[in-house]
Image: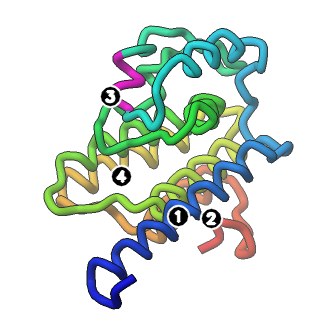
Amino acid sequence: MADDRNGRDKQARDAERRQQERDLATELERGDEKEPPVEAAELGDFEAELEAMNFPATGTEIVAALGDRAIESVEGSYTVEDLVPETDEETFDTPAAVRVQVQRPTVAAAMKRVVESSETLRNTEFSWTQRKAYEMTFQELAAIDADDDDEGITAISDWIVDHIGEKEKLPTSRAVRRQAAKFCRANGYQVRVDEWLGI
């Protein structure tokens, strides 16, 4: 491979794709769910419908094909359209990637809002690592305020969307973590410095 800008860009894209695959494998193997997962029996029919689709598939294609499909979780009922960003920029390489997305419905719904809001920005790339950092922040909030109807997730997703609208750029993952930590402390949740939100 040539040592020029195109070659370096391809190497960076390949490295990001490999990281996505590792993250997906970790998500699938993880047994200590912070948010109650969607029941496996509920995903049986949904997964069969997913398998019938051609992958990779964009969020727009998945919503067009399965958008009104209901997913039941411990937290309530959601449609695929509620959980998958309806955009051509969001690509799912396998049915398993979609399954990971819908298994944490409150986090997925928040990320959908953020991803769709980020599309209003010009010349801004929402990288995989930044998305994962946002997701980890939402997952930590789900674990911290599990009894409060995900008030923290709603507050931080609102803050991110407002930040995008006002500043016309994505907040850094560190700024999102800092805002989540402020929310937690203001609402009486202890955040230790050795935790993800401990900024």
Residue at 71 percent across and 47 percent down: it is 27
Amino acid residing under circle 3: Thr
Q: Residue furthest left?
A: 122
Would you call the spot at circle 3 few (<14 residues within 10 Å), some (14-19), or many (20 or more)? some
Q: What element carries label 1?
A: helix
- Which x, y percent locates residue 137? 57, 55
| Spatial separation of the CA atoms under disc 1 and disc 3 | 29 Å
- Sequence-earlier tag: 1 or 2: 1
Q: Which mark is residue 160?
A: 4
In magenta, the rendered stretch is 59-64
Residue at 51 percent across and 42 percent down: it is 93
| Spatial separation of the CA atoms under disc 4 and disc 1 | 11 Å
Amino acid residing under circle 1: Arg
Q: In this view, does 19 lie to the left or right of 156?
A: right
Quick check: 168 above or below 43?
below
Q: Is mark 4 on a helix, strand or loop?
A: helix
Amino acid residing under circle 4: Ile
**Residue labelled with disc 2:** 197
Q: Viewer-nearest of labels 3 and 2?
A: 3
| Spatial separation of the CA atoms under disc 2 and disc 4 | 16 Å
| Spatial separation of the CA atoms under disc 3 and disc 2 | 32 Å
- Sequence-earlier tag: 3 or 2: 3
- Which x, y percent locates residue 144? 70, 47
Q: Quadrant of residue 91?
A: top left
Q: In this view, does 10 lie to the left or right of 125?
A: right
Assess whether mark 2 and mark 1 are in contact (beta carbons under 8 angstroms): yes
